[in-house]
Image: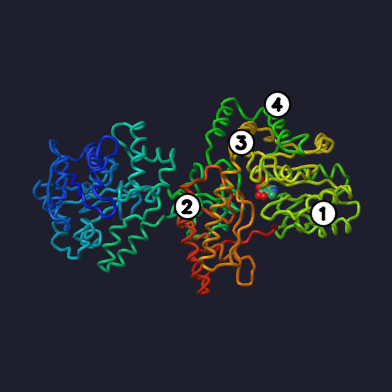
Amino acid sequence: MKVHAIIQARCGSTRLPRKVLLKLGARTVLEQVIHQVSFSRSVSKIIVATTTSPDDQPIVDSLAGTKIGIYRGSELDVLERYRECADLFQSDIIVRVTADCPFIDPRLIDLCIEKLISGGYDYFGTITPPSFPDGLDVEVVTREALERAWQSALIPSEREHVTLHIRMHPDRFKIGNYRHDVDLSGIRLTLDEDRDYRALVTLTELAEQRCGKVVHLNDLLDLLRMHPEIQLINGSIVRDEGLSRSLRADGLKNFLDELSRSSMPTIRRSQELFERARAIIPGAAQTFSKGYTQYVQGVCPIYLDHGKGSIVWDVDGNSYVDLVQGLLPNILGYAHQEVNQAVKDQIDAGISFSLPHPLEIELAEDLRRIIPSAEMVRFGKNGSDVTAGAVRLARAYTGREVVACCGYHGWQDWFIGSTARHRGVPEAVRKLTIPFQYNEIESLAKIFTDHPDNVAAVILEPMNFVHPKPGFLEEVKSLAEQHGAVLIFDEICSGWHLGLGGVQKRTGVVPHLSCFGKAMGNGFPIAAVVGRGEIMRLMEEIFFSFTFGGEVASLAAARAVIRVLEREPVTQTMASWGNRVREVVQKNVANQSLEGRVQCLGEPQWWVMKFYDQEGKDSLALRSLFQQEVVKEGVLFLSTHNMNFTFGQSEFVIVERAYQKAFSVLAQAVREDRVEQMLEGSPIQAVFRVR
Ligand SMILES: Cc1ncc(COP(=O)(O)O)c(C=O)c1O
């Protein structure tokens, strides 16, 4: 049985003329395709099928002196070109290859040939639906099926796209498809545009350094994992654009719909995992804000697989610019090399020791140098550990019980009892924590009046998305001191994002105690409560102790983060890109007349987009619609913009395009009063509001 690979190649290309003769390293694109195919064990001959047009003579010339077969046939009727070529060379089985796929994988070719033969198929491929990267797809067809297709295909698009007629008639042809277990169809390794070429040149250089003679799918995935920036170059180009255009011209809308459905990013594996998780993990997540209630279901991914810098990949292989960054920790982006190296060095030496480790002192000394209120330091793992520790210290120090709070401070009883989600917290505990309003000093004063001599602590985020009114923080401090209460700044979020040293450093208002967490370890779990020595000393009398308090890998991570923040212009960089994204929002809001519906609040390195309904109330529906639209365009969005140091031009371009599209959908929904109807899945649910 003669198994031949027929590579269709032309010089004419509307988007990138003469693309097959461009250079990728030492070879032309066409030579690179031939090179890859030549490693197939089953293909006995490679033939290039080009056209009779003189424009394609350079292709023929470029193959002079090689063993490659050449056939010249019709320019537009590519089906006929293939059929005649297969006739001439007496091929029995034809691997259809296009000359714009320089990394086609010979192993996948062999696998499809084997499946076609053993299953007795007329056609076997990987594109119905696609699950391999664009450019790695394989189609294998028998000459007999090709002949039948040639006889009955009438529509121009069926003549232009060799296997389309066969794929459109599963009733007449026995068709098989091989699917990758993870959907990789969002990855682009084909050559249609200049952007593709740039991506492929970079990939070729890397492959030359790191891979063997032939490049396989796994090599490519490894390279893309190590260099996520490559996908940003061309990742947004729509798959199968040429085919879509000709199908549309031929009025084959149904098939086009099917095609686009099957090539849309899927979240199939996410959904499968979700079903498994629901049976065993209450809430199907460990953190409320990462759970399924916070993302439009049916559209947004539910599980992520890995991340690098600003980019994350979900378990279905889709990539996103991640504006959430793990809910703020990744200030230097995912998998930061220097931080990870510090941790790797440490884990080889052990991380959870039986006695304290010197790194505890070193990090404590770093924090004392950086944070104005830090005379002494203790560590925790989550923000909730250290806010609870600070509140217990304040109660121990003052001998009082009531806590005045402002903002969100964690999951523990003392705080969560004051919110709407207080089930399970005893009434006696709930009564002791009383919220006051930010920038409204009177609301705090009232708590002191209502609980004379019994307020142990005033705890607040000194700033989140709203700036303190002039004098507000000073007034809070003087009220607290006047009434003998401990002032605690919760800088879990503001710490590092609003500058190393937190808000206390920039405002000069120094609290008695303060709490840090989130960005401290760039994702490694570490938090700190710091403060005046005379209060902190009471740690020796209260109980603030847990097995992993001094876990060393995270201490090493925290020191590395501080080193980078002291060395590099992290805050400035995040602020500058944050500002640029905000300008995009403002421009679109103005262009789409959405004033009053969308507002940006906060500092450019950590800000939030608020959505309002007609009455000016927070609108979860509008937020959901915006999330739905930007997620489809490759942006993972909750509403906060947690900028990170690696966010740059490539990420900006993706966000800008996604926002532009989403705003036009939002405007249409608002105009037609159809916000809910335009949601493709269940909307985001409210957790509770404290900010
Ligand atoms: C201001 C503030 N304080 C405390 C916490 C609690 O931190 P964790 O979730 O790490 O326990 C959070 C978490 O979002 C927070 O935003």
Instruction: Name the mark nearer the viewer: 3 or 4.
Output: 3
Q: Position of residue 166 (x, y in %)?
A: 22, 59
* Left or right: where 57 falls relative to 138: left
Q: Earlier in the sequence, mark 1 or mark 2?
A: 2
Residue sitting nearer the eye, 69 or 657: 657
**Quadrant for the C terminus in the image:** bottom right
Q: Which residue is mark 2?
A: 270
Looking at the picture, which amino acid does disc 1 mark?
Leu
In this rendering, is residue 270 above or below 39?
below
Q: Earlier in the sequence, mark 4 or mark 2?
A: 2
Q: Residues within 10 Å of mark 4 (few under 14, many from 20)?
A: few
User: Residue 432's mark?
Assistant: 1
The residue carrying mark 3 has its beta carbon less than 8 Å from ligand 1: no
Q: Which residue is mark 3?
A: 561
Report how far apart the C-alphas of labels 1 and 3 lie in the structure.
37 Å
Report how far apart the C-alphas of labels 3 and 4 lie in the structure.
24 Å
> Which residue is at the far right?
453
Report how far apart the C-alphas of labels 4 and 1 lie in the structure.
37 Å
* Left or right: where 599 falls relative to 503: left
The residue carrying mark 4 has its beta carbon less than 8 Å from ligand 1: no
Pointers 2 and 3 in contact (CB under 8 A)?
Answer: no
Q: Which residue is mark 4?
A: 355
Looking at the picture, which amino acid does disc 3 mark?
Val
Looking at the picture, which amino acid does disc 4 mark?
Leu
Report how far apart the C-alphas of labels 2 and 3 lie in the structure.
32 Å
In this rendering, is residue 438 above or below 643?
below
Q: Look at the numbered disc 2 and give the secondary structure of its residue.
A: helix
Q: Earlier in the sequence, mark 2 or mark 3?
A: 2
Q: Position of residue 240 (x, y in %)?
A: 31, 56
Evaluate whether residue 175 shows in this view. yes
